[in-house]
Amino acid sequence: MPLIHFEEADGPERTQIGEGLVKFARAADRLETGRSEGKYFLNHEEGCDAGGERIETGDEFFFDTEAGEILCADHGRERREERDAVGEE
């Protein structure tokens, strides 16, 4: 499953997503709907699941669709490198 990189968070609580990510967000219990600003949102108000860092407006972050985790930029890059290394073995 992919590790999705978001270049900028829309806000500190949530970021709007497209329909292609809805099933992953729902499975991770991170899907928000019914807001006037848009149809689907990824909730990341609790911050980075690996270290607790807050995801602020404009911050880049990652969504690990396999683990259902939100990761700050540093932890997301680490996770990507780990997966790439395992794939090379």
Image: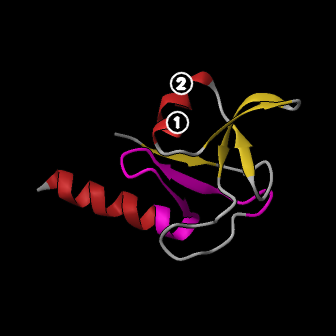
Work out which residue is located at the far top of the displayed protein and give it: 19
Q: Mark 1 Cα within 10 Å, few/some/many (few <14, many 20+)?
A: few
Coordinates of residue 48 in the picture (x, y in percent): 57, 67
Q: CA distance from mark 2 to mark 1?
A: 11 Å
Which colour scheme appears in the figure?
secondary structure
Provide residue 9's location: percent of width, then percent of height. Answer: 73, 51
Q: Nearer the viewer, residue 39 or 60?
A: 39
- The disc, 2 or 1, on the residue closer to the chain's N-terminal end is 2
Q: Which residues are magenta?
A: 56-76
Taking 54 as reference, is 43 above or below it? above
Q: Above or below — where is 48 with respect to 15? A: below
Asked whether the beta carbons under mark 2 and mark 1 sit within 8 Å of each other, the answer is: no
Mark 2 — residue?
Answer: 20
Rendered-image quadrant of the C terminus: bottom left
Specify the quadrant of the image occupied by residue 78.
bottom left
Q: Name the disc covering residue 17, or none.
A: none
The one of 46 and 17 positioned closer to us in this rendering? 46
Indicate yes or no whether the magenta region holds residue 61: yes
Which mark is on residue 26? 1
Task: Please check the rendered image and state whether residue 74 is part of the magenta-colored stretch, yes or no.
Answer: yes
Q: Is residue 17 left or right of residue 23?
A: right
11 left or right of 78 in image: right
